[in-house]
Amino acid sequence: MTHEEHTLNSNVPVSSSSTLGDDLIAGLVVFLVALPLCLGIALASGAPLFSGLIAGIIGGLIVGCVSGSHTSVSGPAAGLTAIVAAQITSLGFEAFLLAVLIGGLLQIGLGVMKAGALSAFFPSSVIKGLLAAIGVILILKQFPHIFGHDADPEGEMSFIQPDHENTFSELIHIADDIHPGATAIGLLSIAVLVGWGKIKLLKNSIVPAPLVVVLMGVAINLFFKSLGGRWLIEQSHLVDVPIAQTATEFFGFLTMPDFFQWNNPAVYVGGVTIAIVASLETLLNLEAVDKLDPQKRASPPSRELIAQGCGNVAAGLLGGIPVTSVIVRGSVNCASGAKTKVSTLFHGLLLLLSVGFLPSYLNMIPLSALAAILLVTGFKLASPQLFKQMWGEGRYQFAPFIITLTSIVLTDLLIGILIGLAVSILFILNSNLRAPIRQIVENRDGSELTRIELADQVSFLNRAALDTIFNNAEAGSEYLIDATNTDFIDPDVLSLIRDFKAVSGPARGVKVNLEGFRVSYHLNDEIQ
């Protein structure tokens, strides 16, 4: 059995009676959080509201079935809103669905080719910066909803919003748009969530705090409705699920792709764009959610690409917007105590049943109660302890971490991640340039010998460092290049060493000794 097969098989979660209760509770909490996010992301993307709900159902049931992750939850992604909105505008919704289908097929192909292995190269500082950034965004974005300021769609994650406001200007407008009823529910919900975690008896109970908050919010909403006046919470401050009066009307919400656009090049460009961006976001979010898993289980990334591809093929066929692994849902899932992917499947089933049979009851849930759940989750993701830990690990970890965080908050998820990855790569290159190789100065018979000990893996990244050492060698000095513990040397580095040994070193009066090189390198040991 190959390593990939072992990883894949070892990550197929099996629920048992001991974990089923935790999974069902977690799935319920994720459902409550995912519902308004599905609607908000669809609205922000310029797509029909029902397409967001379809994507959420597909992310839970179809992706959940195929995925090998224990805790990741998929659905419509805020990081794709700009791309989705632009493609719907240029292609039209039906042709856009064909692009989503093509993107899904490409993702399946990437998974079959084991492209998920690229996730192993994502720096941990960027992953932690992503988690902290999501936490900060949740705090900043949900804070207005606590007070009933709902100008932007619930779940919008970009710095620049569809109403042309931004994250910080929205905070300023809170003072002019405070709704007393929504504020009372929001602040009381935060108090319950925080207090629930501090009281041992409540914390260890089987009743999840978010469920209590939602039920409490509905009850208070009904009470305020009886009071009327300024306490009355209008529908704009509540969940808004489309209601179908008949089964025919319900199935009428589904939209088929326009297959007559198969010869439109723009559709294929859109499909490739969706496949690349959705795959990158999925792999990063998968890594991030695995770090939140209390059991620290690893998810097979290539299988996840296949799962996401299956989900996007289904989304394209049924009229949904693209799906990815979503860090907000995954973090809520982990925080709610999920043990296996049964929680993901259950959340998808609840979305399906609620949209079909309970939309009028869901529309009684105040957005401020759901905002409180997300805001408290944000504080857990962006905890002061995380910032302290990253600061303690030094600038080569802290700088990419804080730059990734800031970039995501001030732009959007995808652009911020790309900036973070670029900065991290620059720091890696700088680190290899500064101190990738060990140098030891030894005294031999009254003269100094500089021993250069090569690492076990010498890649092209080490070439610049070695070149600097060789160029700084003074006339009359003596060097010993030791490859005794080296398993691999890049051909470019070997060429550099050969040139220093045979040409540039002797030309400047530098004695060059070699030790420990393999026969295949065509560099014989030579001690002068």
Image (cartoon, grey):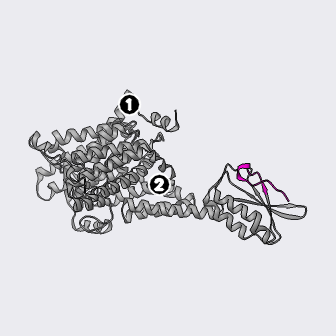
Query: Residue 211, how many percent across, how many down?
Result: 28, 42
Query: Residue 189, how many percent across, how many down?
Result: 28, 50
Side of 217 where 111 appears, left or right? right
Most frequent secondary structure within the magenta stretch: loop
Q: Quadrant of residue 337?
A: top left
Who's the residue at 38% across and 30% down the image? 15
- Helix, strand or loop status at disc 1: loop
Residue matched to label 2: 128
Who's the residue at 17% across and 56% down the image? 236
Would you say residue 160 is visible in this rendering?
yes
Instruction: Mark 2 or mark 1: name the one nearer the start of the chain.
Output: 1
- Helix, strand or loop status at disc 2: helix
Query: Residue 107, how many percent across, how many down?
Result: 37, 48
Name the residue nearer the viewer: 134 or 59: 59
Which class describes the residues within 10 Å of circle 2: few (<14), some (14-19), or many (20+)?
A: many
The magenta segment is 514-528
